[in-house]
Image: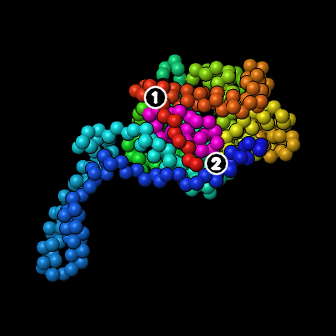
């Protein structure tokens, strides 16, 4: 817990990161209005208030200017939103993606009036649910498409509550219109893990947004009321082995269940805004009893009765193949961090036809 506490203070007492305003030189010129044009437009608008003939002449010429500027603006906006410019297509660099990272990190630091004080956990869940629909047989689903923007996928029971995460990222998308939602959601997951004190998550761009026709059928994400066979079925369909399944579910160190979303209720550990191996330590060290309540079957710790485990979490200590990895991760946080990072990268890359090579993935600088 001491190290978790230290990480907590690192995560939340960070100084403000570099400013997130995005003004690459190549693009700022695209919107530049020539000096003369700008001042006559200003003059034109101010004369509209006057009633003299000269004023109305000025006003009509101002109207022409205003129309011209609007047309320029619309054309510029079109090119901008389509990633093109008169100078050629805008190709974002690692520095541009770092600016997106910084903007998300800053927003995480500012928006603390939510849940346990951070949107980080629900952003990690968004990245996972966007990716965890992947089916290796058909190559469908996965993070490449961000189809959870549309009903019916947004209305799938498993995705309840993820609107909070999608809405949180909307101002970032407005600030950086060139990034796809698919890249943004996965980048936000990587950013949240790092900002909450977790391992580095190397990341690469290249996901394309798809339309509603690419929505995956309901039922591809795991059902928490099930056991070990279901976990292997669902994660096996994505291409993961036992070790990887256990590592991934270790993300339950973060956040909490909400009775108005999944029906389950409560956090898995005492520091839900700090990435740690506490989920595994508690699974091994605590005694977990079935909670007596008027809700779905879940488990509570004998000592404080304030924490919870889902039936699928408890399956990790009931099944021998899973338990050996729970033990390894409970014992050694470094091993968990390393293996979690590798498997989370694999998760958010399932089914994506990248141009960027694996060895060229970006390592984002976390805020300080
Ligand atoms: C057997 C597999 C899994 C099941 C059944 C499961 C189920 C759930 C459920 C029921 C919740 C509570 C949702 C709510 O009420 O708000 C939840 C939350 C969460 N899950 Fe999982 N999950 C699984 C795997 C994963 C994986 C692989 C990750 C990430 C790599 C993950 C990350 C999270 C996070 C961060 C939260 C907290 C969200 C918040 O605080 O809003 N889960 N999960």
Q: Please provide percent x and percent y for residue 170.
A: 47, 49
Where disc 1 sits, the SS reads helix
- Does the numbered disc 1 mark a residue whose Cβ is under 8 Å from ligand 1? no
Q: Is residue 219 left or right of residue 290?
A: left
Give the distance between the C-alpha atoms of the residues marked 1 and 2, in whole angstroms: 27 Å
Q: Is residue 60 left or right of residue 326?
A: left
Front residue of 202 and 120: 202
In this figure, what is the number of numbered marks? 2
Please name the residue that numbered disc 1 is placed on.
360
- Does the numbered disc 2 mark a residue whose Cβ is under 8 Å from ligand 1? no
Front residue of 163 and 341: 341
Q: Is residue 265 above or below residue 63?
A: above
Q: In this rendering, does residue 320 appear at all? A: yes
Q: Which segment did they paint magenta?
A: 183-205
- Sequence-first tag of 1 and 2: 2
Q: Quadrant of the N terminus?
A: top right
Please name the residue that numbered disc 2 is placed on.
11
């Amino acid at each position: 817990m001491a190290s978790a506490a230290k990480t907590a203070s690192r995560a939340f007492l960070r100084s403000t990161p570099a400013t997130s305003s995005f003004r690459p030189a190549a693009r700022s010129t695209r919107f530049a209005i020539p000096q003369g044009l700008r001042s006559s437009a200003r003059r034109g608008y101010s004369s509209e208030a006057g009633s003299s003939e000269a004023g109305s002449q000025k006003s009509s010429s101002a109207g022409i200017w205003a129309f011209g500027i609007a047309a320029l603006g619309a054309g510029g906006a079109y090119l901008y939103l389509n990633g093109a410019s008169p100078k050629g297509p805008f190709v974002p660099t690692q520095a541009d993606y770092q600016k997106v990272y910084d903007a998300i990190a800053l927003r995480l630091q500012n928006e603390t009036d939510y849940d346990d004080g951070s949107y980080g956990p629900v952003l990690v869940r968004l990245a996972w649910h966007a990716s965890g629909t992947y089916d290796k047989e058909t190559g469908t689903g996965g993070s490449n498409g961000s189809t959870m923007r549309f009903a019916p996928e947004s209305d799938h029971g498993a995705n309840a509550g993820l609107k909070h995460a999608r809405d949180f990222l909307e101002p970032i998308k407005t600030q950086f219109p060139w990034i796809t939602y698919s890249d943004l959601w996965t980048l936000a997951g990587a950013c949240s893990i790092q900002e909450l004190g977790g391992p580095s998550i190397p990341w690469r761009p290249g996901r394309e947004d798809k339309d509603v026709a690419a929505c995956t059928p309901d039922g591809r994400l795991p059902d928490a009321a099930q056991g070990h066979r279901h976990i292997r079925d669902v994660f096996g369909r994505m291409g993961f082995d036992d070790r990887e399944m256990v590592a991934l579910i270790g993300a339950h160190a973060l956040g909490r269940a909400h009775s108005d979303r999944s029906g389950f209720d409560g956090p898995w550990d005492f520091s839900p805004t700090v990435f740690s191996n506490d989920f595994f330590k508690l699974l091994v060290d605590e005694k977990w009893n079935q909670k007596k309540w008027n809700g779905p079957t879940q488990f509570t710790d004998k000592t404080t009765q304030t924490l919870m485990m889902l039936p699928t979490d408890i399956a990790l200590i009931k099944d021998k193949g899973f338990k050996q990895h729970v033990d390894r991760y409970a014992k050694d946080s470094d091993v968990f961090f390393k293996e979690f990072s590798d498997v989370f990268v694999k998760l958010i890359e399932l089914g994506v036809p990248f141009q960027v090579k694996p060895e060229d993935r970006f390592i984002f600088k976390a805020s300080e």
